[in-house]
Image: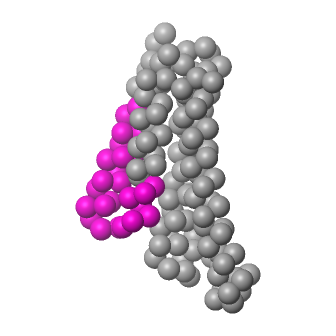
């Protein structure tokens, strides 16, 4: 498996982890009678600030996966993962850092750090698009 595919699998696994965490907490809230089974808003807006941040962190992953994931797949299918392999793990790490910061805080410093982590991902994606288009 190429580094690119490993990173793609990691991105998918991270997105799934956030979903499992959110649904695990929701299940506990239902099981303990804190929230009725039909009492959840999709964005967790009726729950704690952490749960709202968790819903957004998961949504951010879902929003990025089609772009970043497809670029990785294009590289592998076109047998050009040499373009994506060197930065694939960096992109995954930046995604995880972005999510962790999102889960921790929404302070101005945290939002700035989260944007920087996202900016790294965008820069890598642009680099990949250019690299894949040129060669």
What predominant SS class does the magenta segment belong to?
A: helix
Q: Which residues are magenta?
A: 99-124
| Farthest bottom residue in view | 33
Colour pattern: one colour
Q: Quick check: 106 left or right of 130?
A: left
Q: Quadrant of residue 41?
A: bottom right
* Residue 98 in view (yes/no): yes
In the foreground, 78 or 100: 100
Residue 100 is a magenta residue = yes
Q: State whether residue 25 is above or below residue 70.
A: below
- The residue located at (28%, 56%) in the rendering is 112
Q: State whether residue 51 is above or below residue 15.
A: below
* Residue 133 in view (yes/no): no
| Farthest top residue in view | 135
- The residue located at (46%, 76%) in the rendering is 49
- The residue located at (47%, 67%) in the rendering is 53
Q: State whether residue 60 is above or below residue 74.
A: below
Q: Position of residue 82 (x, y in %)?
A: 50, 16
Q: State whether residue 80 is above or below residue 115.
A: above
Q: Quadrant of the N terminus?
A: top right
Residue 42 is a magenta residue = no
Q: Quick check: 108 left or right of 23?
A: left
Q: Position of residue 36 (x, y in %)?
A: 71, 86
Q: Position of residue 105 (x, y in %)?
A: 36, 67
């Amino acid at each position: 498996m190429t580094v690119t595919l490993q990173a793609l699998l990691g991105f998918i696994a991270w997105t799934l982890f956030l979903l499992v965490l959110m649904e695990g907490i929701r299940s506990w809230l239902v099981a303990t009678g804190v929230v009725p089974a039909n009492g959840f808003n999709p964005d967790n807006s009726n729950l704690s600030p952490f749960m709202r941040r968790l819903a957004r962190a998961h949504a951010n992953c879902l929003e990025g996966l089609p772009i970043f994931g497809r670029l990785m797949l294009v590289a592998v299918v076109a047998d050009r993962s040499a373009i994506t392999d060197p930065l694939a793990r960096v992109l995954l790490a930046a995604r995880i850092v972005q999510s962790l910061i999102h889960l921790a805080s929404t302070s101005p410093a945290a939002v700035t750090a989260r944007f920087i982590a996202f900016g790294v991902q965008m820069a890598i994606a642009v680099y990949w698009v250019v690299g894949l288009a040129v060669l």
